[in-house]
Amino acid sequence: MVTGNPEVTPTSTPPPPPASTGIPSMRGNVARHALIRDLLPESPGPITRDSQAFLELADDLPVRHVLWRLMTGFTWPWLLDTATEPDARDRAIRRGLVAPPVGEGDAVLVAYHLTDAGRAELLDWVERITPHRHLPEVEALWRVVTWQ
């Protein structure tokens, strides 16, 4: 048997592992640079129907519904038009959250798509709402946006 490396023969033994304490040494016992430390989740503060946090989550749900539909694949005009409100689509486009389709009627070359700002907006909303979804009022907001 011929190998590409003359130092390795079929009967040679593999080199010993590097000196370490194994997997536990990779789980946080070793200092990591501040830029690559894992983010610790913030504990959510109290939220009520009258709180500022709830009002921010409930702000412009039809636009968030447009963003959600695009994120889940409703990108062609005929598909998004049947699933969302026209004024919500227009507001999302004016705010730079959605790029409109390119082309007309049956000759659409590029479908609707989320912009980076739209993706960031939706992800920010999901991160803010997730810790509070156990509350019925917040779960109702989630259902309005996701239709689940």
Image (tube, grey):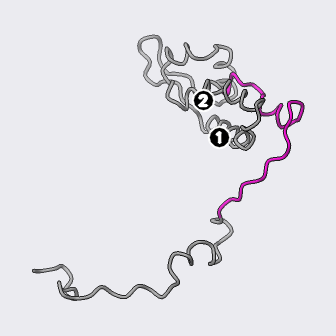
Q: Are marks 1 and 2 in contact (CB under 8 Å)?
A: no
Q: Give the numbered dot on residue 123.
A: 1
In the image, 73: left or right of 31?
A: left
Q: Give the numbered dot on residue 68.
A: 2
The quadrant the N terminus occupies is bottom left
Label 1 SS: helix
Q: How far across and how far down the image is residue 46, in percent?
A: 86, 43
The residue lying at 68 percent from left, 24 percent from top is: 144
The residue lying at 37 percent from left, 88 percent from top is: 16
Kind of residue sitting beneath label 2: Trp
Q: Specify the farthest residue to the left.
A: 1
Image position of 58 with respect to 126: above or below: above
- How many residues crowd mark 2 within 10 Å: few (<14), some (14–19), many (20+)? many
Kind of residue sitting beneath label 1: Leu
Q: How far across and how far down the image is residue 74, in percent?
A: 51, 24
User: Marks 1/2: CA distance?
Assistant: 10 Å
Residue 140 placement: quadrant: top right
Image position of 32 with respect to 130: above or below: below
The residue lying at 60 percent from left, 29 percent from top is: 68
Queried whether the magenta region covers residue 61, the answer comes back as yes
Q: How far across and how far down the image is residue 102, in percent?
A: 49, 21
Q: Please state the extent of the stretch shown in magenta in the rendering.
A: 38-64
